Amino acid sequence: MLEFLKIFLRYAKETSTLKLVFHILVLLLVIAWAAVFTTIALNFPTVSRLYTAWQNDRALIETSQIKQHMLLNMLASQILSFTGADRVTIFKFTTAVRDANRLSPDEVIVPLVSASSPGITSEIDSRKQIPIIGLSSIIKELHQNRCLIVNDVTLMTDEAARDVFTNAGSISIMVCPIKDQINTYGMVLIENVKAPANLTPEQITDIKQKLQLLHEFLIFGLSLQ
């Protein structure tokens, strides 16, 4: 160590101040990197365990997403069969809707799954995103935990909502919320229900109970995306 100091002092006398400072900084940087690599090497088992845990969590999330999608498909098919509709689509909101009067134009409704009767296209690909602001009147109904039933979409007074559904080929619709006590997380669109005006209150209640099964899975899904 003493010899190293003698060599360093002799070097310092023969070198300009600027060059000396630069070399000292380089030396300090090398020492710092050496300390980092030494720390990683000494703690490699811990780092390895953390990486393995991260990989396992990622695999669990991917598995959960697959299971969620399968369950939503199954429930959409059950609702389709129960209502005799042409098409059932489950949508989620990009952000939980707490106040329908403060919707952002940037928020959209995203279709997750769709089930259709034979001969009816699902149209889920053509419904990549629906501007949530265009359905504000419907969102207000959903936020109150009410299902909206429209026998003829061409008679809807909300022009934006009317355009959304007529462009999709809807004739009649039933829209129900997926929500908990605070937030509205998504909605289920049931199109062209056979004689929707003839649905009894008991049938509507049964449909709503089936739809309530979805909200926890959608809440979980929102945390994964």
Image (cartoon, rainbow, N blue to C red):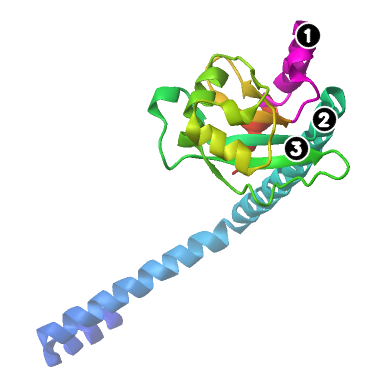
198 drawn magenta: yes
Give the distance between the C-alpha atoms of the residues marked 2 and 3, in whole angstroms: 18 Å
Sequence order check, earlier mark of 2 and 3: 3
Q: Which residue is mark 1?
A: 200
Helix, strand or loop at label 1? It is: loop
Helix, strand or loop at label 3? It is: helix
- Foreground of the two, 36 or 147: 147
The vertical placement of 27 against 103, above or below, is below
Mark 1 or 3, which is nearer the eye? 1
| Quadrant (top left/top right/bottom left/bottom right) for the N terminus | bottom left
Q: Position of residue 77 (x, y in %)?
A: 84, 33
Q: Which residues are magenta?
A: 192-215
Give the distance between the C-alpha atoms of the residues marked 1 and 3, in whole angstroms: 30 Å
Tell whether 143 sits left or right of 56.
Answer: left
Question: Within 10 angstroms of label 3, few (less than 14), some, or many (20 or more) residues?
Answer: some
Mark 3 belongs to which amino acid? Gln
Q: Position of residue 224 (x, y in %)?
A: 61, 41
Q: Which residue is mark 3?
A: 68
**Label 1 with label 3: CB-CB less than 8 Å:** no
Q: Quadrant of residue 119?
A: top right
Helix, strand or loop at label 2? It is: helix
Does residue 82 appear in this view?
A: yes
Sequence order check, earlier mark of 1 and 2: 2
User: Secondary structure of the magenta portion, mostly?
Assistant: helix
Mark 2 belongs to which amino acid? Leu
Give the distance between the C-alpha atoms of the residues marked 1 and 2, in whole angstroms: 17 Å
Question: Within 10 angstroms of label 1, few (less than 14), some, or many (20 or more) residues?
Answer: few
Q: Which residue is mark 2?
A: 80
Q: Residue at x 65, y 51 (%)?
A: 126
Q: Quadrant of residue 200?
A: top right
The vertical placement of 124 against 200, above or below, is below
